[in-house]
Image (tube, helix red, strand yellow):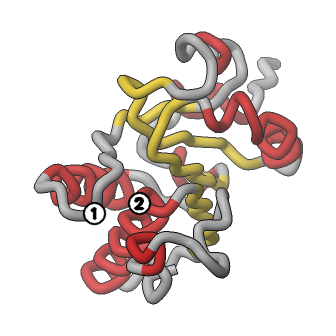
Amino acid sequence: MIILKMRDYRSFYPKYYNCLMKKVLLVTRVSGFIPQHEMKHVRILQDMGYEVHYASDFNNVVYGKDNHRLDGTGVIRHQIDFVKSPFSRQVKKSYLQLVKLLMEEEFAIIHCHMPMSGVVGRLAAQKVYRQTGRHVPVLYTAHGLHFYTGAPLRNWLYYPVE
């Protein structure tokens, strides 16, 4: 008798794999954030039976020197071309890439970090809900505390969205 680990089902039963395991998506604008700050949480999620996916711009490594710290962790990576400026034309491209990912994979939870990836992640989840009726809770963790007395006016432009 052959005993398969949960992640082995993907290769044997790809059509039914989405029904077997819950998936969580972690979203950041820049690469390296998850291995730098969130690996303890990734391991907790994996121990709880979640398959962890990570959507980021892996061409923009800010934390660390490269993306090799994710090798061997079981985290599935998805390239999304995020940009920092909300006024860039590239925002639409990252939005459409994330919508496509959310349509292909059935995530149980989406956890966004950083302002732009948080906005794009929430909008993409809303689009998927409108198209499919599939509601996925989106968590957003604010980092950097952009809103404080004396903060530059441009920081406060994000406040209504946050």
Image location (x, y in percent) of residue 2: 78, 18
**Nearest to the observer: residue 87 or residue 90:** 87
Q: In this view, does 157 lie to the left or right of 112?
A: left
Q: Is residue 143 left or right of residue 60?
A: right
Residue 41 shows up from this direction = yes
* Label annotation for residue 116: 2
Residue drawn at 11 percent across, 55 percent down:
89
Q: Quick check: 155 left or right of 98?
A: right
Q: Name the residue under label 1.
A: 86
Spatial distance from mark 2 to mark 1, Cα to Cα?
7 Å
Q: Which residue lies furthest to the left in this view?
A: 89
Give the position of the N terminus as an image quadrant. top right
**Looking at the picture, which amino acid does disc 2 mark?**
Met
Q: What element carries label 1?
A: loop
Q: In which quarter of the image is residue 41?
A: top right
Q: Which of 46 and 138 is in front in this view?
A: 138
First in sequence, mark 2 or 1: give its number.
1
Three-letter code for the amino acid on which mark 1 is drawn? Pro
Q: Residue at x 17, y 55 (%)?
A: 88
CB atoms at circles 2 and 1 under 8 Å apart?
yes
Residue nearest the viewer, comparing 15 with 150: 150
- Outermost residue on the front side: it is 150
